[in-house]
Amino acid sequence: MRVREVLGVWAPMLVGILLIAFAVNFLLRAPAGSGDPYFPLDPAAAAVCGGGVVAIGGILILSTYGRWRKVRAARRAGK
């Protein structure tokens, strides 16, 4: 496996997976309501924030996977 392949394909996919994992963790463990006076968090805002991060991670994974499939098909056609 080449460094270019790792940096171009697997690293962005790993970042996307980590973003999704952090967002799910945030959604599951976010404080409900304004129990903390220093960090009041509306549950709807937490859902929008977590959902947005999941969407960004998903887009990162899907775009990288699509680019990888395109390059792989071009390599196979060139052989």
Image: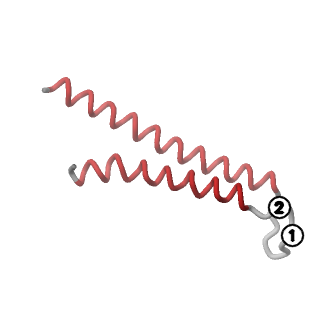
Q: Quadrant of residue 36?
A: bottom right
The residue carrying pointer 1 sits among few (fewer than 14), some (14 to 19) or many (20 or more) residues within 10 Å by Cα, namely few
Q: Amino acid at mark 1?
A: Gly
Which residue appears at 56% of the width and 46% of the height?
A: 56
Q: Amino acid at mark 2?
A: Ala
The residue carrying pointer 2 sits among few (fewer than 14), some (14 to 19) or many (20 or more) residues within 10 Å by Cα, namely few
Mark count: 2
On-image quarter of the C terminus:
top left
The dot on residue 32 is: 2
The single residue placed furthest to the top in the displayed view is 77
Does 1 sit left or right of 35 as displayed? left
**SS assignment at label 2:** loop
The single residue placed furthest to the bottom in the displayed view is 38
Residue 78 spot, x, y in % from top left: 15, 26
Height in image: 63 above or below 26? Answer: above
Which residue appears at 86% of the width and 70% of the height?
A: 35
Question: How is colour applied across the structure in the image?
Answer: secondary structure
Residue 9 spot, x, y in % from top left: 34, 46
Which residue appears at 32% of the width and 30% of the height?
A: 70
Does 77 sit left or right of 62 as displayed? left
Determine contact: label 1, label 2, CB under 8 Å: yes
Height in image: 35 above or below 71? Answer: below
Does 29 sit left or right of 73 as displayed? right
How far apart are the alpha carbons under marks 1 and 2?
7 Å
* Circle 1 residue: 35
**SS assignment at label 1:** loop
Height in image: 48 above or below 39? Answer: above
Which residue appears at 74% of the width and 55% of the height?
A: 46
